[in-house]
Each structure stands twice: as C-alpha cells, then as structure tokens.
Amino acid sequence: MKRHLARILIGLATTLFFVWHAAQREKIDLIDRLDSIVYDARLRLTMPGKGDAGIVILDIDEKSLGEIGRWPWGRNLVARLMDRLFDQYGVAAVGFDIIWAEPDSSSGMGVLDGLARKELKDAPGFQDAYRQLRGQLDYDALLAASIKGRPVVLAYYLSGEASAVRANAIPDPVLPKGAFEGRAVSITGYTGYTGNLPAYLESAAGAGHFNPTVDVDGVMRRVPLLAELDGAYYEAFALAVARAWLALENPDRKSPPVEPGFPGDGDRLELLRVGRLTIPVDEHARALIPYAGPRGSFVYVSIADVLAGRVAAEQLKGKLALIGATALGLRDLRSTPVDGAYPGIEAHANLIAGIINGKMKSKPAYVTGAEVVLLLAAGIGLSLLLPVLSPLLGAAVTLAGLALVTGLDVLVWSRYDTVLPLANAILMVGAIYITNMSYGFFVESRSKRQFTELFGHYVPPELVDQMAADPRKYSMQPKAAELTILFSDVRGFTGISEALNPEELREYINEYLTDMSGIIRGRYRGTLDKYIGDAIMAFWGAPVEDPQHARNGVLAALHMQKECEVLNAKFAARGWPELRIGVGLNTGSVRVGDMGSQVRRAYTVMGDVVNVASRIEGRTKHYGVGILVGEATRNAVKDVTFREVDRIRVKGKDAAVSIFEPIGLENEAGSPAKEELRLWQRTLDAYRAQQWDQAEEGLAQLRRMSPDRGLYALYAGRIAGYRHTLPPEGWDGVTVFDEK
C-alpha cells in the first residue's frame, strides 16, 4: 500500500476538490455547465412526451393572420373571441401571453370624438348618431367588458434597467414589503414595468409577469414565481393563471393567497403554498419548469378555427386556454432543455400544468448533504481500490461506480421528483480514474492550437494566410476599432416563402447567401459575421486592418444589388419570385473580438454603430432605395457619388442621422445623372427650408427625369401633408421614426 500512497493521495485530493465544490464552497463554471447538460438529458429521457390534456394553446398562427388579418387585431375581435370561448365553447379560464399596453384606435373613434367636440358639436343629428355609435366603436371598452367577471389572466413585463419606465398598470403585489425580512432569500428585483391598460387590469381576474430566468448557457430551465418591485413581491404569469384556476374550486371564486414556506422554520425559502398546492422553489423563488415533451406536446388550436366555429366543443369545454403567438414575426421562442426554439407560450403551459398537478421537480436544502456523502463514499472507495487493481479491473470498477451513481440519481429523480446533481460525481469518478491511469506520465507542454484553427471559424479563409504571416499582430481579445458594418435583408421574404415549397426555398436562400457572401468575402475582403435568417451581417476593418473599409463596404453593397439582377434572371427562368434586398451600412467605433456566452462564442462586433447600421437598413424600404449609408460612411468614401436621402431620428436616439444612397463610382456617373443629383439637392434644401412651391417644382422635374424613383413620390406626399398640417415650430427637416 505504501508504494501506492501517492496515487491514493491524488485520488483523495481529487475527492476533496469535488466535495468542496458540492458543498458550495467554490463555484466552478465547467461543472455547473455539465450539470445543466446532465439535467437536460435526464429530463428528456424521463418526460412523458405529452402535455396536460386540460390545457389548450390558442395559437395566433400563420393561418390566423391569413384569415383574420395582420396583427394586432382590433380589440372588438378579441372581445368576440372571449365571448365565443366562454359562451359557446365553455372554457374554464383564459390566460393571455400578450400585453395590451396601447389603446386601440383602429375603429376611428378618435376621429368621431374630435368631430363631436369641434366641427359637429352643434349638429343634433350627428350627436345622436355619435352617442349611439360610440359604445360600439370603443373597442377597448368592449374587450374590457368581455373579460370582466370572467377568469381571465393578463401578462405584463418587468424591467430591471436603471432608466426603466412604468407604463400603464400592474396588479397589487401578492406579498407585501418585509415578507422575507431576516430570511436568506434573494429574489430578483426590478425597477420598472410595462403593464396593461388600467381598464383591462380592473376587469381581469389577475395578471402576472412573464420574465424568465435564463441560465448562463442561454437555456430557460426555471421561472421566478416571485419578483421584487419597490420592496413588494409580484407573482409570475404561470402562478397567476394557476391561482385563477384554483379560484374556480372556491364558492367565492377568490384566488387563494401565496404563502412562502420555510421547512423546519429555517431561513431558506424552499416552497410556496397556494391553496391546496405546494410549489417547490429555490432561495430565489424560482421553480423548475417540468417540460412534458418537445414542442407541440400540448394541443394547439388555431384562433382562426375558433372564430370560424370549426373547433369541436369537446376540444375546449372546461379547458384552461392559453393565448399566444407562433406566427412568423410574432413568435416568442426560447432555448429550452427539450428544444432550441421552443414557444414561450408552451413553456408557460408546462409550468402551469406542473403547478396545478403537483408534478414539480425540487432541489431541497438536504440535497447538498446527500451529494457530499455520495461523493465521499465513491471517491474514497475508488481512491483506495484503483491503485491496487490492474488497468482492466480498474476500468471495470470505474464503470460500475459510474453506473451505480447514475442509477441512484435517476431513481431519486423519477420516484421522489428530487434533483440530485450528477456532474460532480461523474467528473470525480472520471478524474480519479484518469489520474491513476496516467500517474507517472508528465505532460511537458500542451500543443498550441494552429493559427488557422483559431481564426478560421470567424474570418474569411482568404485572409488567414495574411494573418498567419505575423500572428502576433492579431488577437481574439475584444478591442475598440473603427469599422464599417453592413446589414442586408431580403424584402418580402414571407411572400417568397409562401410561394415556394421547402426544397425550392432552401435552394433560393442558399444561392442568394452564397453569391452575396462571395461578394463580401472574396471580392471585397470583408468579414462575414453571421446569417440571421435571410439577413446578412458583415463588417470591414477587422481582424485585418483595412484603411479602405468604408469604400470596400459601399462597393460590396453596390455589387450585391447588381448581383440581384443576375440572380433574378436565373430565378425567373425557374418561375421563382423576384429577389429584392435592402442594404444598410454605418461606420464608427465598435468593440470587436471573441464575444458571446459560455455556450457559444463568435468573433463579432458590438456597439451603437452596429445598431444604427441595422436600423438604416430597415429604412431602405421606406425610402424606396436599395442601399442606405450613414454620414460617417459617406464622408469616408471620396470617389463614390451619393444622393442625400434624409435626416432621420430613430427610436432610442436623440441625435439625428444623415442617410445617403450610393449611386456608383464618380467616374462612371454621366451628365444626366449628375444633373439629376444637383437638382435633387436643391429640392431637398428647399424642402428643409419649407419652401414648398420651389420644392414641388423641383420634384415635378425630377419625376419626369426618373418616373419610377419612389423617393420623389415620398417627398411629394410629405409636402402635400405639410401644406395641410404645418410642421411643428422649430421643425428642422428631421424625420422621426418611432419604430426600431
């Protein structure tokens, strides 16, 4: 035994290290991440695969948008939906995963109000009709009336930003200030909220926040059932729905209160009592979501079918209906243990079902002690046995130890709904085995990763050779640098996707992305950051410095528009829809480097300049142009002709931004094009000076020169509007966009 002392001591030291971690003395991210992976695998292996039949998801899906119209719908239609759900289908309760934060003005009631107060206030006939119609046109009042007295639960959002606003109304807290005073409880605090219109909140049975908890790997495994605001505590949406459901069991229809539980009268919060239910939570009041299966485990019913009466009564009668969206552009997708893109409404359904049915996983305080005992037993046993066994027997004993530990963990999980961490045990057993088998073998150095291996995932291969010539000049570490950022997006992609079958759509997008990426990377030496669906993000100036980064970005954008013509010729021959793209560029100081989460990292850029580039791209469709660039980009490029398009102020920005449309290289611009640009600039100056006659005269000439240019029609429409309603005092010609 003495000759094995060193190996035994190494094994015992390894055991103590993992015991130290299990006892919460030291948090090691790698172990915690592995434990999350093990948790996810265990969940997927044991979940039933089918959700609670008593919960139905009413889906705002593509079919609903196609039949009813684009979102948001008029509140009168939602009111009709409520009446149909309760009166015709007999649902038990409804939960809205939607915030009704803004009044519905789609009925035109505001116009009638104005006429009734001013122009037609003395018209008896109009006033009589107005009084009769107003109740029918107050869509907000209709919806509020339709949910009043019914078990309808609303949702709201809490914000933790220092400058967070407090919009509309949220319900009273479920626990008052001081509810956890003197206890070892740490509940996430917030500073602001976006709630529902007061009329809705007054009419609803309750409301809850839908703020999730996202782990460090970006996965949503738990939800905070309580959140702190101004010292008081507010319930989550899932808890509010569950309480409304429990209220149906009470004669007075009142929701049961929320009571915190401290087993053994300890300081650590471990459960919440709600009526007859006991909900296990951690010290942050977070509950593990008991996912029943992959996406689609719960029954989905299209709202279009509900409104059209195509749903069988037994599908909804007595059910808890959750209303959410999965339609493209509206969907709320989350990364979960069971699916990388899981609908948020179905995550709510899983948690609500677990709360109501009492099928929740828990991790009580005694789990830490049980894990420590398990680690000590397994670690000491292996540390003493492995040094004296042959490699073959040692491997067999190690595998047996792993099987025993894993089997015990699964038993506790399945039979007692208790989460016993497994990563520590797996890693400890593996570490003891590896250190014993490799004892005496000293690794002098770890081989360096090849330079191309390091950067090849992030930058164009054609730049790797240049970088490899002097690798000391390049680093993955984030740094500040002046770059040019490009965003490109396909216009009308929804229509394209509907016109093509899946195979054709894949070929369509693949060919588009391939050609555009070749222009960015190959022709103009840009760094292709990422694809965001059908959108492209790229930048110039890093990791290889490029003094001409703005010029290369602009020329790449011009080339991309020309390539669209080539692609459209091919697509037309196949009977495919026309491809049109918008491209936005902006230049400025950003942070560039290897950034991201502990699950996924990438060589990318971040900063305000990036956000502005994205928003500039979003304005191309509004102005009817293919490319827009920021002022800094335009000033950095000397040999390209630009057309100034506008000065804009986007949401979240105080300063106005000048945007320009690149036309082409100066030496390629002919006299007619230059004359048109000069006339346009004079017209734009007259517009900003509010010289409407001069501006309209210039626009008339310009529209004769280029009848199809939408920019001229846009400004003509603006001037017509300003002739009718003068710009506000101090107007400086800046166009304000409220949307992002």
Image: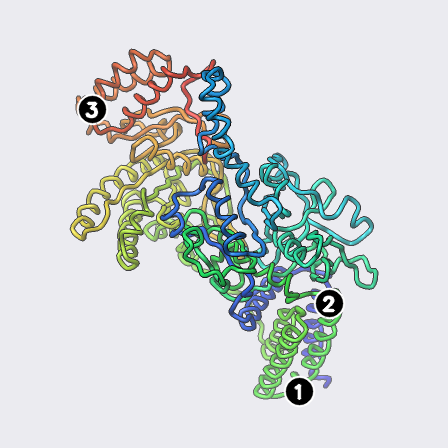
Q: Is residue 448 visible?
A: no
| Quadrant placement of the N terminus | bottom right
**Which residue is under mark 1?**
388
Q: CA distance from mark 2 to mark 3?
A: 76 Å
Q: Position of residue 367 (x, y in %)?
A: 72, 68
Corner quadrant of residue 348: bottom right
| Tag 3: amino acid | Ala
Does residue 166 appear left or right of residue 24 in this picture? left
- Point out the tag, 2 or 1, that comes first from the N-terminus: 2
**Which secondary structure lies at badge 2?**
helix
**Which secondary structure lies at badge 3?**
helix
313 or 475, which is in the foreground? 313
**Which residue is under mark 3?**
673
- Point out the tag, 2 or 3, that comes first from the N-terminus: 2
Q: Are marks 3 and 1 in contact (CB under 8 Å)?
A: no
| Tag 2: amino acid | Thr
Badge 1 crowding class, 10 Å Cα cut-off, few under 14, some 14 to 19, many 20 or more, is some
Q: Position of residue 312 (x, y in %)?
A: 45, 61
Q: CA distance from mark 3 to mark 1?
A: 88 Å
